[in-house]
Image (cartoon, grey):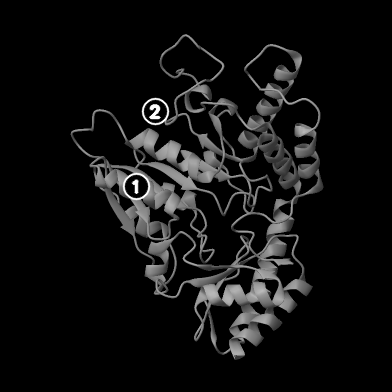
Amino acid sequence: MIYFDNAATGGRKPPSVVSAVLASIEGICGNPGRSGHALSVALAENILRCRRLLCRFFGGASYERVILTKNCTEALNIALFGLLRTEPPPQTLPHVISTVAEHNSVLRPLLFLERIGRIRLTLVPLQEGLLRPEAIAAAARNDTALAVFTLASNVTGISVDPAAVRALLPPRVRIVCDGAQACGHIRIDMARAGIDALAVAGHKGMHGIQGSGALLLSDSLSPAPFFYGGTGSESDNPAMPDFYPDRLEAGTLSCPAAASLAEGTIYLESALEQNAARIRAMSARLIEGLRAISAVRVYSRPNPFGIVAFACAHLQSEFFAQRLSDEYDIAVRGGLHCAPRMHAALGTLETGLVRASLSEFNTDGEIGRFLEAARSIAAD
């Protein structure tokens, strides 16, 4: 199979990640932080190692404020509901800025909070197909509390510089970033960029396994707990502990997921820039080839996230993707990609788009075979 669906989940993992996951489930499995025996302590040290690596890689405030999650959606929900769903409801509702380019993991929580009367929401439109920092900052009001935006669109691969947004926003406005498509593809330094909360998908560009993710918090944010349960600490306390990470982590953590995320981070520390350059070059070649097909319209520009979205004039995106799979053994994604406002802005809400998404493990030969298949399908 030619796997061009890496924006959904990374198809291939570095050998070190695979070895780490196997090592974590072979032999005796224990529970980190729940016992004092040697195995439990060793596993807790592995979890701590993962937190330290992520904190260093993303320029976080401290390893205690690295909250391990099962995916980026969970991280975003912890941040948004923890910051915005206050009890009792505030007398003056906070204003939140977001954008039409967001994934449903941002849109659905914010729209829900708006429906139940916890926030007022502004969605910033695209300008010439792009998200511009000036447009996000221009939406700020006196009551604006948060700006929540993606660092890279999962539909077209457009990106926005959080440091540029931070420079234009009033200091009181906190920034929450969806890093699902950007983390592991570009360097992100929370401190330098002024990011207050960064949600990370472990299973995409970070090369972890499914079930891995993280939420990194600056010292200025203190979300209320979103989950309640056992933490292995303060078991006699009827409330969640006040300290991090326990305050936001209830239940047993996944040792295999943490092991994979740690090894993926180590791999990226030295390989990120080389991978990004390779992925950008491959996306440019793919875009150039698709633009040469008369029935195809391309919606992406070359990008380090490997995302290339396109439409065929006479064939629904899901059908195009299905033919690639059935006839050519090529995996892509068709449809709305859980980002309906983005498709509405692009004018593709009815037809969707075909999204091919690359990783550094893809090859020029695979791109050539993909373009041959796309030309054949578009010609029918």
Residue underneath mark 2: 224
Residue 288, by quadrant, is bottom right
Q: What is the x, y in percent for residue 287?
A: 62, 76
- For disc 2, the neighbor class at 10 Å (few under 14, some 14 to 19, many from 20) is many
In the image, is residue 45 above or below residue 177? above
- In the image, what residue occupies the spot 66% across and 38% down? 257
Do we see residue 41 in this rendering?
Answer: yes
Residue underneath mark 1: 110
In whole angstroms, how far apart are the C-alphas of marks 2 and 1?
Answer: 16 Å
- Quadrant location, the C terminus: bottom right
In the image, is residue 158 above or below residue 31? below
Sequence-first tag of 2 and 1: 1
- For disc 1, the neighbor class at 10 Å (few under 14, some 14 to 19, many from 20) is many
303 vs 40, nearest the viewer: 40
Do we see residue 194 in this rendering?
Answer: no
Q: What is the x, y in percent for residue 187?
A: 62, 49
In the image, is residue 305 above or below residue 230? below
38 vs 145, nearest the viewer: 38
Determine whether the residue tagged by mark 2 lies in a helix, strand or loop.
loop
